[in-house]
Image (cartoon, helix red, strand yellow):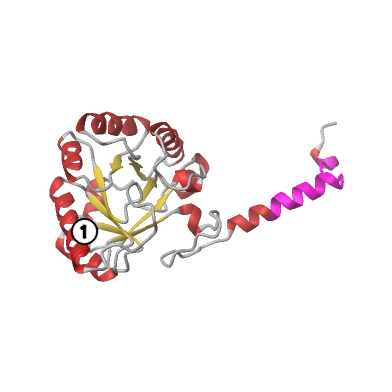
Amino acid sequence: MKSIQQIKSMKSMQKIAMLTAYDFPTARLMDGIVDIILVGDSLGMVVLGYENTTKVTMDDMLRATGAVARGAKGTLIVGDMPFGAYENEKDALKNAGLFLEAGAHAVKVEKKPEIAEFLAKNGIEVMGHIGLTPQTITTFKVQGKDRESADKILDEAIALDKAGCFSLVLECIPLTLAETITKKIKIPTIGIGAGIHCDGQVLVTNDILGLYGDFKPKFLKRYAEIGSEMKKAFEEFAKDVREEKFPADEHSFH
């Protein structure tokens, strides 16, 4: 398993690969392949069926984190702090501690450099997240396209770097802005819809496997169509049962 320090040392040296996981079997298959597993609050949409991530609870996240930790013993695990879990220092420290107890090695927060700094000073490793931040921006839209908003995002990146984050997710921003941020800050940047210049990349596993409907943003690359394969298996099973082809004799006890 790569340590936090090893992840930080990969900046400008080797690209960081990060994917999401929410369950034991996926984490077990992914273990040792990617550098970081993110237990993302995206589970609210791709697993629980919510319209956005704001309904995800700490219980949802801790259950998923525990499952992932049991499946991935050799990969750095980051737990995504859900909406409302870090509104103040007291709640942030308590909930971050619960993530660590569940098996995460670090937590992720959207913006809030003051909270990130407080957690870091209390010995908790923090991954930052700026750009399109799903807990506060629920409409899919590229961020930082004009000078004013780009400058604001750059300032947020610098603030989170100074706060003590060990890495920073850049979501849905122009690649030129991502390049500027990546060159400006000391910690690795991990992009999702932020172009090639980031120090690493992250995607939602359910998206790259074709498990989440028709969601196909420009930045997404499909690596498999597992959803259609699953549907085919379900149809074949139902057909076999109805035609009394399953169970056959080899599936029965004598």
Above or below: residue 236 compared with residue 24: below
Region rendered in magenta: 232-250
Q: Which quarter of the figure has residue 18? A: bottom left
Look at the picture and state if 4 lies above or below 142.
above
Whether residue 193 appears in magenta in the rendering, the answer is: no
Is residue 240 rendered magenta in the image? yes
- Residue kind at label 1, given as amino acid type: Ile
Residue farthest to the left, as pictured: 162
Q: Nearer the viewer, residue 106 or 169?
A: 169
Q: Quadrant of residue 116?
A: top left
Q: Quadrant of the N terminus?
A: top left
Badge 1 crowding class, 10 Å Cα cut-off, few under 14, some 14 to 19, many 20 or more, is: many
Q: Is residue 92 left or right of residue 203?
A: left
Count of number-bearing discs: 1
Q: Which residue is mark 1?
A: 153
Magenta stretch: helix, strand or loop mostly: helix
From the viewer's side, name the closer residue of 129 and 221: 129
Secondary structure found at label 1: helix
Q: Which residue appears at 32% of the width and 64% of the height?
A: 194
Residue closest to the far bottom: 176
**Residue 133: x percent and y percent?**
32, 52
Q: Position of residue 54 (x, y in %)?
A: 39, 42
Answer with left or right where residue 223 lies relative to residue 174.
right
**Residue at the (22%, 62%) spot, across then down:** 149
How far from the left and from the top, in percent, is residue 236? 76, 52
On screen, residue 176 above or below 3: below
Q: Which quadrant is home to the C terminus?
A: top right
